[in-house]
Amino acid sequence: MDIVFLDNLEFTVDLDELFNTIRMDREDDDADTVIKMAKDAQSIARPKALYRPAYVDEKGDNYVVIDGVKFISRVMSVNLKDVHRVFPFVATCGTELEDWSNSIDDMLERYWADAIKIQALNCAFKAMEVHLEKHFNPGKTACMNPGSLEDWPISEQAKLFEMLGDVKSTVGVLLTDSFLMVPVKSVSGIKFPTETDYENCQLCPRENCPNRRAPYDKNLFAKRYL
């Protein structure tokens, strides 16, 4: 199992992005507090990621077997129709920032801390993408995440973690009994090469989602996945 572990990543809080995210002007009375929090977080943050190459063993109408692990998903089966190698992964803001944010009592400051943790998570995810591209050259890729669609339920998260070994010891991400990750600002999934544009959001009807990356296409499932 050739697991790639990425640690000691360079992380700098983007203050412009942070103020934009929390909708605050730099002239606001609380701006100095936000800047101090960003500096504190940056000094302790250790975002991390791990991934590995894995190979498709078998495909059915509504399942895919990857390195002996069977995932139940019609969407995955179609998406991986012509794919032989995929990359299961976990990326996280890190336990250091999680512990730091949990020590904050003020609710508004916790909101600001969450925005900082999202930047750290994005740093880890981007580092993984760069490393994957450099060492495996998969070309254009897309991503599926357990629990993001009803078709691939969050309970499948346990199988994904099974493929990645001791995730808690490696990157500090714990999988709860309800299959949620701690730290919360973590992401898991399977990256795969594709010739077509794919985002989970295209199949998700949830309105007003702050993380939406593509508009919902009500006809896409019937057109591509039935």
Image: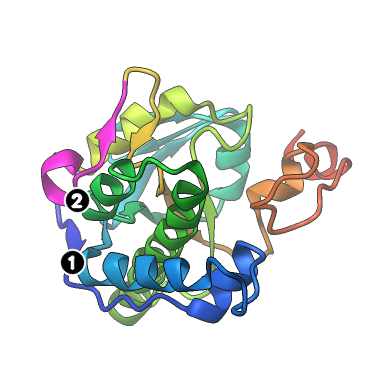
Query: Is 211 situated left or right of 224 in this image?
Result: left
Crowding near pointer 2: few (<14 within 10 Å), some, many (20+)?
many
Residue type at numbered disc 1? Asp
Query: Is 85 situated left or right of 19 in this image?
Result: left
- Please provide the residue range marked out in magenta: 167-176
Q: Residue 105, how many percent across, how many down?
A: 37, 40
Residue type at numbered disc 2? Val
Q: Quadrant of residue 33?
A: bottom left
Q: Is residue 95 above or below residue 226?
A: below
Query: Is 72 situated left or right of 206 in this image?
Result: left
Q: Residue 49, how many percent across, how many down?
A: 27, 59
Query: Is 109 situated left or right of 220 in this image?
Result: left
Task: State which quarter of the image contains the C terminus.
Answer: top right
Query: Outermost residue toward the front?
Result: 29
Q: Which mark is residue 7?
A: 1
Q: Is residue 150 above or below residue 109?
A: above
What count of labels does the image hold?
2
Q: Residue at x 53, y 26 (%)?
A: 153
Element under label 2?
helix
Q: Is residue 175 magenta?
A: yes
Structural distance between the alpha carbons of marks 1 and 2: 8 Å
Q: Residue at x 25, y 39 (%)?
A: 163
Q: Is residue 188 magenta?
A: no
Q: Residue 194, how many percent across, how many down?
A: 57, 63
Residue topped by disc 2: 171
Q: Nearer the viewer, residue 51 or 213?
A: 213
Element under label 1?
loop
Q: Residue 165, how many percent across, how many down?
A: 16, 40
Q: Is residue 165 visible?
A: no
Residue contact between numbered discs 1 and 2, judged by CB atoms under 8 Å: yes
